[in-house]
Image (cartoon, rainbow, N blue to C red):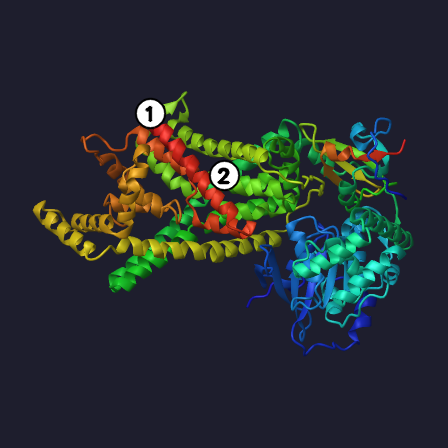
Amino acid sequence: MARLATIPTVSAPAAVASSVDSIPTPHARRELTRIALVGNPNSGKSSLFNQLTGLNQKVGNFPGVTVDRKTGISQLTPQHRAEIIDLPGTYSLYPKSLDEKVITDLLYDRESAQYPDFVVVTVDASNLRRNLLLFTQLADLGLPAVLALNMMDVAEQHGVHIDIAELQQELGVPVIPMNARKGIGVAALKIVMAQHLDAPTVSFYEPTEELLPMIRQIRYYFNLHNDYLALHYAHQFRHISFLTPDQRQYVQELVEQYGFEPTARQAHETISRYARINEILLNAVSVTRTERNEPYSNKLDKVLTHRVWGYLIFFGVLFMMFQAVFAWASYPMDLIDQGIALINSLIQTNFNGPLINLLTEGVIAGLGGVLIFIPQIALLFAFIAVLEETGYMARVTFMMDRIMRKFGLNGKSVVPLISGVACAVPAIMSARTIENWKDRIITIFVTPLMSCSARIPVYTVLTALVVPDEKVLGFFNLQGVVLMGLYLLGFLSAIFSALALKLLLKTQERSYFIMEFPVYRWPRWKNVGITIVEKVKTFVFQAGKVIVAISVILWVLASYGPGDALDKAEQQARVTAVQQQLTPEETDNRIASEKLENSYAGLFGRTLEPAIRPLGFDWKIGIALITSFAAREVFVGTISTIYSVGQDADMRTVQQKLAAEKDENGQPFFTPARAFSLLVFYVFAMQCMSTLAVVYRETKGWKWPLMQLLYMTGLAYVSSLIVYQVFK
Amino acid sequence: MAIRFTTAAPTTQRSVKDLRLGESGTICCLQDPEMALKLLEMGCIPGTQVRLNSRAPLGCPITLVLGDEDYTLSLRVSEAATILLKN
């Protein structure tokens, strides 16, 4: 396997390197050492993780929750490999968001198989005071730790001088100065990480006397190794996932008995810690005030968050992103499409039989439906990763918060909503950064209403069918205007659904917007690349499984029918073909169409017809609606099969076929009323198994995906009904 | 250094919300206990210097520069109102 974890430049302090060289590695022969990486957001934790593990990373799930569990293998020394767990960024051990709860669950359970041998704490050297808060908490848990003193370059620019030896003395753990973005100090860190580390000897906070009776009882009951951990049980027993209801009950009774006040205690603890940290910094850090110009970040912000330019630039960035996702991605997508078609035709010309059909029309076609999205997802996440790496995304949430809040959303909802235009699956996953439960649920709920890229084929085919290709106001293309209208419709429905949910949902939890405002930085392309690879992998393996499975089921439904109905249909089709003197190709199409009509899928379509007739749809569209449930773009393929266009669905022929379709009176079937009714249906309807699956995963239950399914399908039905009844 | 959890109406005392653009003050206490925990973790410690750095185009949220380090925090005006200043 290729390794990218080699370090370009190393400037390790000689003292650290030489002192540890002589110590033999005690667990070199042991199985993997398990090391957890912890640190504040923006402390360079991801950069360090990428430096340590390169592409040798794996994304899984923490047991029981949906938070991504990023692990990687790092070759510390030629003999010593370690498994690194990248924990979500946090400011303290008192978790606020779903992501952060993972940390406490992992670090409070010594019995867990996942319990790390030690932690590497990344801190931003230019902002030591706030960063050391988390470190002191971890040290007080009794966890062996290494301090990765990151961003030394920034600290130096700010005139902050850190006495490493003194700091190491004061903190009682190895301190490695580094610059993870450039890879400086990584080699020294690896050497230290390969050593056996003892629990830290320095304590930074002792729970006050009056708490000790309660703490000792908890400690004894759970057989814990230290007081501070027992104190955390008292604070967080409701959220610690590995406690049984009985154990929670026990802690709750103790807490009530002793009149424990968590908020006041936590505040007191934090303040005492800061007081202690101030003492340490007084000895170990000196600051030379340099006369500095206004930071370049501030100058940039004057333009980028300007009341006019700020929004204009933001829309410019969005425009670029859509261009990339829609225009640039189409080339690789066409290649994938043609490649899949080529493989299928190769297999079909050389082999035969029902299993081969299952392989080509079910599995490979389904796989194609997954692979085709890779260019868009990769491009979208390239953009999002760059915007986040540079710090621009923080400015976007900053500018949009006030507007989004009016609709029950949050500045941080902007990212999922924008991503939803490419694909709701990664978009919903990106809503995890929203700490507030209500804001997050609302964001997840409305994101699928944003018109995703899978709707494009449907939009373009139907728009081209009923909207004339002419200019309005001289230069706007009318079809383009309609297309934009459909996107706007999706966006407005998302916003107003959010507003309705805001009024309906009740919550005690408060919405915060307190966040660090990072300085602008050049993106690290390696981080961007790794993000892209990781997101694509997640999509292919998680959403991909569902799409392929549904494609196979649909293939079975479309290929088999009750009894010998299909055989009869084929014979009937052959007879008609002979009577009407059709060409062999036309005959095949006729057979395919007749078979589909008599298959289980056709049966479902006919069963569905009474329900969708008021919307102007017939049983043929009914089949397309059912198959669209796997993925919306399947619509075009299904329609082309039903209207017997043949396998290689050329858009123009689909359109011609649709235009040629006649109703019972011999008039064109696809009137503007019908086409618009269908378009509106596709704007609103929840027709995506993958989205439902990911919402289930993210909300840990069927409640929200089912509500989404009912709400969106209901909205689609009612809107289509109105459109058709008004315009017919 | 003390934290004061008070529910009394802050009519006389100025909060971070009342700072003018570019103006500095010293944090005296945090008014809202729950919010205080979050603010403390983020570095809003009583006794720290705070400067109103910028406002979002629509007036909210705002950004603050904390302490003598170049550390910028963004928060809503309603959240800033709970950070009281020394007179």
- Amino acid marked by disc 2: Phe
Above or below, comparing residue A527 to residue A220 in the picture: above
**Among the two numbered marks 2 and 1 on one chain, the one whose residue lies closer to the N terminus:** 2
Q: Counting other residues with Cα less than 10 Å from the Cα at mark 2, is it few (<14), some (14-19), or many (20 or more)? A: many
Q: Counting other residues with Cα less than 10 Å from the Cα at mark 1, is it few (<14), some (14-19), or many (20 or more)? A: few
Give me the residue at 47% from left, 56% from top.
A540
The answer to whether A335 appears left or right of A350 in the picture is right
- Residue farthest top in this picture: A473
Q: Which part of the image, by quadrant, shows the C terminus of chain A?
A: top left
The residue that mark 1 highlights is A727
Camera-nearest residue between A223 and A76: A223
> Callout 2: residue from which chain?
A
Q: Which part of the image, by quadrant, shows the N terminus of chain A?
A: bottom right
- Amino acid marked by disc 1: Phe
Q: Which mark is residue A322?
A: 2
The answer to whether A14 appears left or right of A414 in the picture is right
**SS for tag 1?**
helix
